Amino acid sequence: MKTLKRIVAGILSTALLLGMTSCATTKQTEAPADAAAFTTIESGKLIMATNAFFPPYEFYEGEKIVGIDVEIASAVAEKLGLELVIEDVEFDSIIAGVQSGKYDIGCAGMTVTEDRLKSVNFSTPYATGIQSIIVAEDSEIKDIDALLGGDYKVGVQSGTTGDIYMTDDIGEDRIERFSKGNDAVLALTSGKIAAVVIDNEPAKAFVAANAGLKILDTPYTVEDYAMAINKDNVALKDAINQALKELTDDGTIAAIVNKYIPAEG
Ligand code: GLN
């Protein structure tokens, strides 16, 4: 079954990438990232594209965009001697923008997929995501098989892995696309759709903020989050990976994740 294959693929890719990280460790410990070796779109700046409606990875606190991705990207930028500039854009425009040289990185709880790897490079993964299923508390949908097997309408955020994989599994006719995950959740609360498939951490935040919803125990997929980087800018990818490695080794990334997701830290 596709779902199980994806979960296994997620675990395997995490293992593979962790393996790759440790190879990179041996190779790169001698020298720190060489600031002269990479270029960015605007000198001295690291332009990050995100979609700031994805708590706790990126969300607005007043006028300010904060969250796990923002803090990890700013720690990376600082290591590289760059100023982080955040652009809040539609999620499904991020990969194209990185590919066309509009943004240096896409950092948006972005899942590494084979399809996206055709358009961009990805950094070393820095987090794991799970596609979760949100339903009404009294829903007759008890698990993923019931959801897939019925004729329920499912809400997704446009262009996300939840959208891509669900469309693949249940077909266009049963999919309702929303530009923001929260709008999908609102459609669920008003009974327009039967479920929302979305990443687990925003799912928890949306369920906490809206009465009468719950997350099913069975996950849909397990995925790796990483930063998308232009394929031609291999030097930037190497420098970012080196910075991520240092930030992992000294506990900075774990501390950032713990700050926003205390129970799982
Ligand atoms: N992890 C999902 C994806 O990459 C969703 C990310 C998001 O909505 N910001 O497609």
Image (cartoon, rainbow, N blue to C red):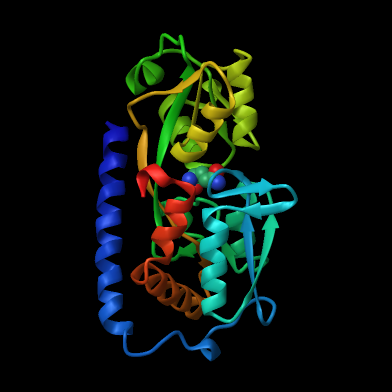
Direction right: furthest residue: 63
Image location (x, y in percent) of residue 108? 55, 52
**Residue drawn at the location 52% of the way across and 42% of the way down:** 160
Q: On the rendered structure, is 132 left or right of 187?
A: left
Picture quadrant of residue 4: top left
Please report the residue visible at 48 percent of the width from the left and 81 percent of the height from the top: 235
Work out whether 13 lies above or below 3: below
Residue 100, relative to residue 165: is it above or below?
below
Check the image and report above or below for 7 versus 104: above
The total number of labels drawn is 0
User: Residue 175 in the image: x percent, y percent?
Assistant: 54, 25
Vertical order, 81 against 186 (above or below): below
* Left or right of 81 in this view: 62: right
Q: In which quarter of the image is the N terminus?
A: top left
Q: Where is residue 3 drawn, in percent x and y?
A: 32, 33
The image quarter containing residue 238 is bottom left
Residue at (56% x, 73% y) in the render: 77
At 39% from the left and 75% from the top, the residue drawn is 246
- Position of 256 with respect to 209 (left or right) is left
Residue 243: x, y in percent?
44, 75
Along the viewing direction, whichever of 145 and 213 lies nearer the viewer:
213
